[in-house]
Each structure stands twice: as structure tokens, then as C-alpha cells.
């Protein structure tokens, strides 16, 4: 028996929108307080979401519960699987002393924490976003930053702010591949349009990042290096997205940015800092290579894991697909969200071998052996890691369960339709729609799937380019990445700040809001001026 979604269940657009917002407001409100732990906030938000779906919207209770279970499973795999193995790798490098050497190696390039921040959180993080996505860059960079002396709150918040401009092209272009699938628009046109929106912000983010960390005056002291990092990322981002496609944008731009940044720091240093001599660092070459080995290995394996050829082969021998009985193709999306009624698939994909987390697990095992770990040492480290992040896995599962109930009940579409009433201002508020989608679901890919069709339909009604608005959904969405509950929990777990999720949210929220507003203004200019 199919169930069509209802987009005005209360008989009033305003009242229906307020009811749809209630679980999200409750969740964020609880997170923002200092009294409620993240796992309890997530469970309360989930209960509210199910209640709204069943009692206000009229979704069958069995479907709502199945959607919650589906989302919880996705929270554990692949997201929790990535987090578990990244922290395991980090723990091995700490226990074997390799991480301490890595800290000194980065200091050999620059002792300036402002520049270390840009190198790791912006450039290095962008590489992992491009290669893997789904929480990997925040987990890796937050752990690295805290090891370099950043406070846990700074490491978490700054990693989240840095992980913005690359997100639309993350995981080898997955968000745009999904967007093309639900809109039917040309892939290269979508890639090119996003590539004409985000490079402006790629130049801006290094400056923004350092200003948040050290203040405007301290940011201006290192502006030449920040310009090099941003421009050397933005230019390849524009060129690759416009003349090749979405698949290698982040990987190529990140590698060029890291290389350009490192070369620039060989010939330039901030005023008042002394050049580092070999005697001052005194790191044997063998020790430096041993410290860099786990992370270089991670880059190689995760990138290879994400390539279509390797992924397809791994899937051919391992993938399992499990339709969610009673939910798969039973929920109908109906106009005006889509042009014709469309059943929503609900299939849990257990690609246990091709998942990014499996590549990270293999990296950790190989790196542990090369660093001299015994099997018993690695087993103890893995058990300790699992014990440490257990509550975070519960939180992530509950957050994703809430997001899936929101999706299948249609509360996300109710909010989207409210934005669609903006008329001539739709390019601005349509950008906010993408932001809201990522904040709700934790994924630019999911936001594009949820709202891509609505963006196209509304763009035709308003009289603006559907390609522009579909791209704006993805570009606006990247600024919501820093406030989605999943990312906040991942950052908190990586920096051992469990219980500080509310503080992290308060740290980043105003920056997320400011940046999406700037993206909205830029999209408005593209719609009506350029």
C-alpha cells in the first residue's frame, strides 16, 4: 500500500511549516544548551520527528519507524564506519610516537599556527573531502589540529568551517552526480555552474578561517600566504569543473594548493618569525618518512578506493542491497515537489568492501604493521577506540534516523515549498533551501536528492535558470555542512570533546549563516545581473 506525502497537512501553509520545523528547532535548541548531551538531544529530536510524521502529517506509524531504522543503519554504516577507523588510525600513530614526529615535521615547514591551520584544515581537508567525503576530512583534520596544540573547541569548529568550499565536489563528485540524477540536467552544465559559484568562496575561506582563529589584524599579517592557498585552490577548481567535470575537482585543486602553499613558505615567512634551521628541528629523515607514511598511505588508498573502476570491482564481489520492506517504493513524492508522482526508494546498501571506511581500516592495519605494532596491540587499540566512540555512534545513528524520518514523511518538502514562495527573491532563498537540506540531512548529496527537483520546478515558475538554481542548492548546501549534527558529532569525537556539541554549534553557527547569505547574494547577482 502506497502513501502519498502531504505538504499542507494542517490546512494552513504557515502552520504546516511551523509544525515541520518543530523537531529541528527542538534538536538545535537542546544542542545549543549546556545541559543536554548530544545523544539525548538526538533521541528527543527523533521522537519529536516521528510524532510530527505520524500525528500531524498522517504518515503510517510503521513507515515512520522503518524510516528511522533505515536512517540509523546508515548512521552506523558508512558514516560510523569511517569515524571508527579514522580514530583507530590516529590512535595507532599516537601510541607509536609517529604523530609527535609529524607535529614537528609540520612545524619544520612553518611554526606559525595560522598557516598550519590553513595547510591542514583547508588544503589537506579538501583532499580528503574530494577523495572520500562523508565525515572523513573533519575527523582527520580535527585530530591533527588538536595534536598540534589547538584547543579541542578550536580544532572542531575550525575544521568544520574549513570543510565548506570543497563539499559540492566531494567524494569524487558524488553530490553533483546525484543532483544530475534527480533533475535530468546536463552533468557538465551543473559542474560548470557550481564551478562559477564556489571559487569566490574558496579564495575567501582561508582568510575567514584565520580571522576566526586569530582576529582580523593577525589575519592581515599573513595575507600573502592565505591568498596563495585560496587562489591556487580556486583557479583549478574553476578550470577542472568547467572543462573536465566534477569528478577530480577537489583532489586536483587540493594537491595544487598544498604544493603551492608549501613552495611559497620556502621563500616567505610572516614578519617577526625566524627561519627554522635543521639544528632546531633535528628530525632524522627516516623518522620523518615514518611519521608521514600513515597519512600518505591513507591518501593513496582512499583515493584509489573512490575511483569508479576500483569501486565497481569491489562492489562486484561484496555489495549487498536490502530493500526496506514496507517502506521501499511505498512513499510517493507528489507535485509540486516533483512533476509527477514518484515512489521513493528505500534500499540499504551494504557495500562493506568498497566503503571508504574499509579503505581506511586497511590503511590502519598496513600502517600499524609498518610502524611495528603487534596484532595484540592493534586489537587493544581498536577495542579502546570502539569503547571511546560508542556514544558518538549512538548520536550519529539517532541524527540520521531523524533525517530519514524528515525525508520520507515529507516535512523537508513542506519547508522547501515555503521557500518557493519567495518569488523574485527565490534565487536568494533557494540557496538557503540547499543550506537547510544539508543542515537537516548532514549531506550535500542528500540535500540535492531531496530538493534538486523542487529547485528545477520552482526555477521554471519564477523564470530563472534551472541549472543555476540546481547548482545553488549544492553551493548553498556546503555552508550548512558545518552546522549539521552529524558533522558536529564527528568533530567532537575526533577531538575527544564529547558533551561539547552545543559549544561547537554555537562556535560555527553565525559563520554558517553569514557564508550562506553571501552565497545567496552571489546567486542573485548571477540570476539577474551577470
Image (cartoon, rainbow, N blue to C red):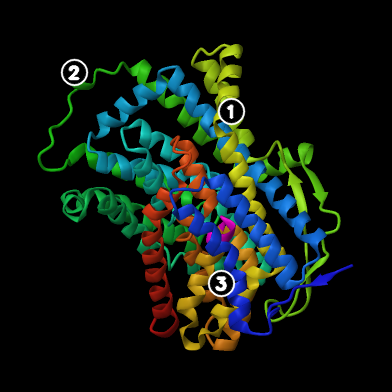
Residue extending furthest toward the left? 272
Per the rendering, the mark at residue 470 is: 3
Residue 394, placed above or below residue 410: above
Q: Are marks 3 and 2 in contact (CB under 8 Å)?
A: no
Q: Position of residue 114 (x, y in %)?
A: 25, 43
Q: What residue lies at 41% left-to-right and 61% top-to-bottom?
A: 512
For disc 1, the marked residue is: 387
Q: Which mark is residue 279?
A: 2
State the residue in front, 284 or 121.
121
Residue pictured at 37% horizontal, 53% vertical: 507
Look at the image and give the residue range highlighted in magenta.
439-443
Q: Nearer the viewer, residue 398 or 164?
A: 398
Q: Residue at x 64, y 34 (%)?
A: 358
Please name which of the two marks, 1 or 3, marks the residue nearer to the observer: 1
**Dot 3 or dot 2, earlier in sequence:** 2
In space, the residues marked 3 and 2 are separated at their CA atoms by: 55 Å
Expressed as whole percent of the image width and height from the top left, the position of residue 430 reads: 51, 75
Q: Is residue 520 in the magenta section?
A: no
**Mark 2 near mark 1, Cβ–Cβ under 8 Å?**
no
Q: Is residue 442 magenta?
A: yes
Q: Image point 72% across, 42% down: which residue?
A: 351
Main SS, magenta residues: helix
Look at the picture and state if 129 lies above or below 143: below
Q: Residue furthest right?
A: 1
Image coordinates for residue 344, horizontal then vertical, percent? 76, 65
Amino acid at each position: 500500500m502506497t502513501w502519498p506525502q502531504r505538504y499542507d497537512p494542517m490546512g494552513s501553509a504557515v502552520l504546516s511549516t511551523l509544525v515541520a520545523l518543530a523537531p529541528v528547532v527542538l534538536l538545535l535548541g537542546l544542542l545549543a544548551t549546556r545541559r543536554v548531551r548530544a545523544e539525548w538531544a538526538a533521541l528527543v529530536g527523533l521522537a519529536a520527528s516521528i510524532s510530527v510524521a505520524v500525528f500531524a502529517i498522517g504518515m503510517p506509524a510503521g513507515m515512520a519507524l522503518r524510516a528511522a531504522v533505515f536512517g540509523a543503519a546508515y548512521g552506523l554504516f558508512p558514516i560510523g564506519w569511517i569515524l571508527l577507523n579514522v580514530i583507530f588510525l590516529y590512535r595507532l600513530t599516537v601510541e607509536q610516537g609517529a604523530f609527535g614526529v609529524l607535529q614537528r615535521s609540520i612545524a619544520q615547514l612553518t611554526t606559525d599556527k595560522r598557516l598550519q591551520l590553513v595547510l591542514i584544515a583547508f588544503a589537506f581537508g579538501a583532499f580528503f573531502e574530494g577523495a572520500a567525503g562523508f565525515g572523513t576530512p573533519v575527523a582527520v583534520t580535527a585530530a591533527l589540529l588538536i595534536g598540534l596544540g589547538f584547543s579541542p573547541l578550536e580544532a572542531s569548529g575550525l575544521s568544520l568551517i574549513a570543510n565548506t568550499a570543497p563539499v559540492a565536489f566531494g567524494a569524487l563528485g558524488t553530490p553533483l552526480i546525484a543532483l544530475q540524477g534527480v533533475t535530468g540536467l546536463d552533468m557538465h552544465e551543473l559542474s560548470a555552474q557550481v564551478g562559477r559559484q564556489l571559487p569566490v568562496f574558496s579564495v575567501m575561506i582561508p582568510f575567514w578561517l584565520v580571522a576566526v582563529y586569530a582576529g582580523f589584524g593577525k589575519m592581515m599579517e599573513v595575507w600573502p600566504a592565505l591568498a596563495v592557498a585560496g587562489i591556487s585552490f580556486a583557479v583549478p577548481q574553476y578550470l577542472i569543473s568547467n572543462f573536465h567535470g566534477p569528478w577530480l575537482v577537489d583532489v586536483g585543486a587540493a594537491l595544487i594548493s598544498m604544493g603551492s602553499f608549501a613552495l611559497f613558505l620556502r621563500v616567505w615567512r610572516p614578519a617577526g618569525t625566524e627561519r627554522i634551521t635543521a639544528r632546531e628541528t633535528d628530525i632524522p629523515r627516516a623518522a620523518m618518512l615514518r611519521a608521514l607514511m600513515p597519512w600518505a598511505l591513507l591518501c593513496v588508498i582512499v583515493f584509489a578506493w573512490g575511483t569508479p573502476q576500483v569501486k565497481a570491482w569491489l562492489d562486484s564481489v561484496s555489495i549487498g542491497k536490502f530493500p526496506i520492506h514496507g517502506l521501499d517504493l511505498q512513499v510517493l513524492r507528489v507535485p509540486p515537489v516533483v512533476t509527477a508522482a514518484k515512489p521513493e526508494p528505500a534500499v540499504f546498501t551494504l557495500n562493506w568492501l568498497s566503503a571508504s571506511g574499509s579503505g581506511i581500516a586497511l590503511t590502519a592495519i598496513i600502517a600499524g604493521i609498518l610502524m611495528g605494532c603487534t596484532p595484540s596491540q592493534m586489537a587493544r587499540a581498536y577495542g579502546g577506540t570502539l569503547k571511546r566512540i560508542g556514544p558518538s555512534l549512538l548520536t550519529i545513528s539517532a541524527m540520521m534516523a531523524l533525517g530519514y524520518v524528515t525525508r520520507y514523511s515529507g516535512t523537508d518538502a513542506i519547508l522547501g515549498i515555503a521557500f518557493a514562495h519567495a518569488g523574485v527573491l527565490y534565487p536568494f532563498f533557494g540557496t538557503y533551501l540547499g543550506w537547510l537540506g544539508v543542515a537537516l540531512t548532514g549531506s550535500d548529496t542528500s540535500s540535492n536528492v531531496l530538493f534538486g527537483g523542487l529547485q528545477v520546478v520552482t526555477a521554471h515558475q519564477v523564470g530563472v535558470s534551472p541549472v543555476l538554481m540546481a547548482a545553488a542548492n549544492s553551493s548553498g548546501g556546503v555552508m550548512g555542512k558545518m552546522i549539521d549534527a552529524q558533522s558536529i558529532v564527528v568533530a567532537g569525537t575526533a577531538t575527544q570533546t564529547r558533551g561539547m556539541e552545543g559549544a561547537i554549534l554555537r562556535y560555527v553557527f553565525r559563520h554558517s549563516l553569514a557564508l550562506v547569505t553571501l552565497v545567496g547574494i552571489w546567486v542573485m547577482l548571477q540570476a539577474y545581473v551577470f
